[in-house]
Image (tube, coloured by chain):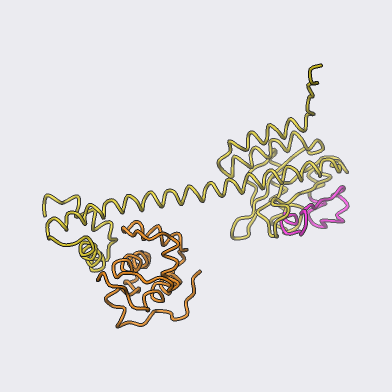
Chain colours: A yellow, B orange
Amino acid sequence: MPPETLVPGAVATEFVELARALLDATTVSEVLDRIVQAARAVVRGADMVSVTVRAPDGRFHTPVETDELATRLDGLQYDLDEGPCVEATRTPGPGLVGSSDLARGAEFPEWGPKAAEAGVRSVFAVGMFPDGAEPRLGALNFYSFSVAGLDGIDRDTAMLLAAHASTALAATEAHSAHAIKAAQLQEALRSRDVIGQAKGILMERRGITEDEAFDVLRVASQSLNVKLALVAETLASRRADL
Amino acid sequence: MTDAQTPPSSGPALRAGLALTDLDLGQLWTAYVGLGGSLTAEQLGDALASRRALSGLEHDMVAHALNEYFLALGRDHPVAYAEELDAREPIVHDARLP
């Protein structure tokens, strides 16, 4: 009997597609954009999704959202220094923070009632790099227009998304660092090549050793207060004038 | 500059110079390679830790790589070259590798 073909559920399919999309993402912006689109699809109770990112200077901003209202509510949290986005970045453990009824103001006394006035009734945020030390890089934020509109399954799904986002962001950062190092090394090799040419010219013209030729270039660089590679490049490009 | 090995003050002088920059060993190695250096990053680390003696030329390449960093900041070659080592004390005696 041929093996039965099993069809994955909608959430699993969405995660498979997300993983595939994240493989192609090469920038932080692309990663966050794909995470937010997936979040909107798999966290069923969420009416709006946004991402909070903490800059190196400690300030927060929202680079990606599904709705302009989410950006405004995120911004209000940053201004008040109160709310699930900011708390999720500095709460130990999973970094899961929220409220099932914002109008009560029990969890977020200032921000909660203001968010409720704007139409949002429940919320939670989960820190990115869930197992990392706080303060974290940022948080994924989920808003609902209904009281208790986000349930336990939504929270678990959000945790999985945050883990995906964290892994993808770490890979992106590693990729960027690698690209910078590669560019620096490429520039070093170009400089080394020009210096090699200049040393060859000096050795030929002055009948000196390679080490002595480097010393000539080094002393000229020191005297003129310009980089040795520039001295070498000038010498190599004006070879006919020498 | 000579082919002879530099005195023991070579390592501390280079180490002190590196400590005054925000470069890490890998970045210094890249700059040094750009000047024609041929030590590996590990060998360079050994030289800075005074576990490996450098020739005058190698010392000068590392010193110049550091001095070019200071040049960009408008400072005048504070790291001693090989010919100056005997006459000058290291900039910071107890500077440690980052």
Left or right for B27, reference A235:
right
* Placement of A42 over or under A55, stated as above or below: above
Residue A193 left/right relative to A4: left
* Magenta-colored span: A86-114
Task: Determine the image quadrant of residue A152.
Answer: top right
Residue A113 part of the magenta-drawn span: yes
For this orientation, the residue located farthest to the top is A1
Q: Position of residue B14 (x, y in %)?
A: 39, 72
Q: Is residue B75 left or right of residue B93?
A: left
In the image, is residue A105 part of the stretch drawn in magenta? yes
Q: Is residue A77 above or below residue A30?
A: below
Relative depth, front residue between B72 and A160: A160
Q: Quadrant of the C terminus of chain A?
A: bottom left
Please state the horizontal and vertical placement of residue A62, each as a whole percent of the image.
65, 47
Q: Which residue is at 76% across, 46% downward?
A: A159
Decide which of B57, A229 is in the foreground and name it: B57
Q: Find residue B98 and report its horizontal and vertical position in percent.
A: 51, 69
